[in-house]
Image (cartoon, rainbow, N blue to C red):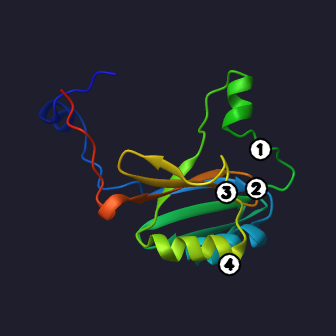
């Protein structure tokens, strides 16, 4: 993959500070809100109903999740999408700073970890879990809480 030099990229588009929110349809809003609260510390900021669908906006730090309940929908995860040759996302990632607190949460909440447990990447560890609807989440802990990549030639 080719990347444009920073000056070209910045001149071509607004510079993004961070991802603002992720919008997901979920099978059971109450169950999902409670799960994200217990597992990741998300708190409800707003609730409502749109076109008959209950929704909630959750916040943990600067991370926002917008959830809409559509109980009748089927989830096609990244693997099912790939089998059908359909684009979509495989998972989304959340970063944790306190690895010990995360491991305690996994134990306390009995959250199953996919792919036989922790995955070691060059600069950190990741755990892959699923929320109540079945969305895959990568929980990343960067070594020394520093996001780093090798320099691109």
Circle 1: is it few (<14), some (14-19), or many (20+) Cα within 10 Å? some
Res 108 label: 4
Residue at coordinates 35% horizontally, 55% vertically from top-left?
Answer: 18
| Pointers 3 and 2 in contact (C-beta within 8 Å) | no
Q: Are marks 3 and 4 in contact (CB under 8 Å)?
A: no
Mark 2 burial class by Cα count in 10 Å: few <14, some 14-19, many 20+: some
Q: Nearer the viewer, residue 79 or 25?
A: 79
Q: Tell me which label, 3 or 1, sits earlier in the chain.
A: 1
Camera-nearest residue between 14 and 32: 32
Closest to the camera, between mark 3 and mark 2, is 3
Say whether residue 69 is left or right of residue 150: right
Q: What is the distance, in whole Å, between disc 3 and disc 4 at their CAs?
A: 13 Å
Tell me residue 39's x, y (percent). Answer: 62, 72
Count of labels shown? Answer: 4
Lower position in the chain sequence, tag 3 or tag 4: 4
Q: Secondary structure at mark 3?
A: loop
Q: Earlier in the sequence, mark 2 or mark 1?
A: 1
Residue bearing mark 1: 75
Residue under pointer 2: 133
Q: Residue at x 34, y 22 (%)?
A: 1
Disc with the residue nearer the chain's start (4 vs 1) = 1
The answer to whether residue 99 is left or right of residue 145 is right
Residue where numbered disc 3 is placed? 113
Q: CA distance from mark 3 to mark 1?
A: 19 Å
Q: With respect to residue 90, does 68 lie above or below?
A: below
Taking the view exactly as shown, the residue that stands out farthest to the left is 7
Q: Are marks 2 and 1 in contact (CB under 8 Å)?
A: yes
Residue drawn at (45%, 66%) of the image: 96
Whether residue 95 is visible here, answered yes or no, is yes
Q: Secondary structure at mark 2?
A: loop
Looking at the rendered structure, the secondary structure element under dot 1 is loop
């Amino acid at each position: 993959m080719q990347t444009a030099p920073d000056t070209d990229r910045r001149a071509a588009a607004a510079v993004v500070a961070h991802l603002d929110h992720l919008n997901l349809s979920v099978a059971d809003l109450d169950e999902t809100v409670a799960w994200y609260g217990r597992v990741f510390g998300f708190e409800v900021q707003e609730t409502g109903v749109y076109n008959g669908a209950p929704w909630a906006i959750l916040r943990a730090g600067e991370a926002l999740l917008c959830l809409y309940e559509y109980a009748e929908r089927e989830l096609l995860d990244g693997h099912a999408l790939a089998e059908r040759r359909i684009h979509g996302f495989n998972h989304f990632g959340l970063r944790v700073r306190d690895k010990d607190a995360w491991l305690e949460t996994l134990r306390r909440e009995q959250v199953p970890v996919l792919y036989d447990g922790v995955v070691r990447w060059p600069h950190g560890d990741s755990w892959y879990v699923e929320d109540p609807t079945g969305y895959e989440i990568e929980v990343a802990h960067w070594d020394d809480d520093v996001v780093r990549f090798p320099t691109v030639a």
